[in-house]
Amino acid sequence: MDAKQRLIDVLSVVTTWGHEVAMINYIKKFCKANNIEHYVDGSGNVYATKGVAEYYPCVVAHTDTVHDIDKIFVKEKDGNLYALNEHNMKTGIGGDDSRVGLRSAGCGNRAGDCRF
């Protein structure tokens, strides 16, 4: 799967605050399919490590979005992605405040070792 299709797949997972299970399951499935060690803590945070190192990069992203919609259909036009809701109206795509907004930091090899 190419990077653009993966991005479309991620943005197509509808999750809102307090209802992030679909995205957590998507991440777990990705980790399992790619032999990436991972676990989910009691708050729903997903921790994944690949390989062995003293320090790991830490990538942080929301698993929810601010849009309270039931379905989202990600489309592409002229190289740009946009989203339609179940009423065929343009809506926020989710990347504006959520699943693809990333922050990186240096991390140790234990959860909670991230330095921001």
Image (cartoon, rainbow, N blue to C red):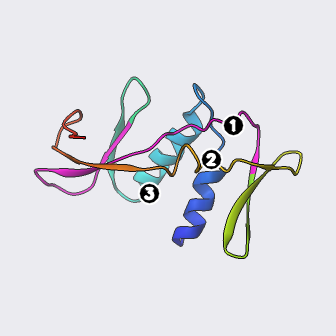
Which is more toward the observer, 94 or 6? 94
Residue span colored magenta: 46-72
x then y, percent, for residue 92: 70, 47
Distance from disc 3 to disc 2, alpha carbons, whole Å, reads: 24 Å
In which quarter of the view is residue 75 placed?
Answer: bottom right
**Residue type (three-letter) at the residue carrying disc 2:** Gly
**Which of pointers 1 and 3 indicates the residue nearer the eye?**
1
Q: Is residue 82 above or below residue 4?
A: above
**Residue type (three-letter) at the residue carrying disc 3:** Ala
Residue that mark 2 sits on? 94
In which quarter of the view is residue 77 placed?
Answer: bottom right
Residue that mark 1 sits on? 67
* 44 relative to 99 in the view: left or right: left
In which quarter of the view is residue 67 placed?
Answer: top right
Quadrant that contains the N terminus = bottom right
x then y, percent, for residue 23: 55, 42
x then y, percent, for residue 20: 56, 33
x then y, percent, for residue 81: 68, 64
Identify the element where label 1 is drawn: loop
Disc marking residue 77: none
Q: How many marks?
A: 3
Q: Residue at x 57, y 61 (%)?
A: 7
Q: Is residue 106 above or below residue 7?
A: above
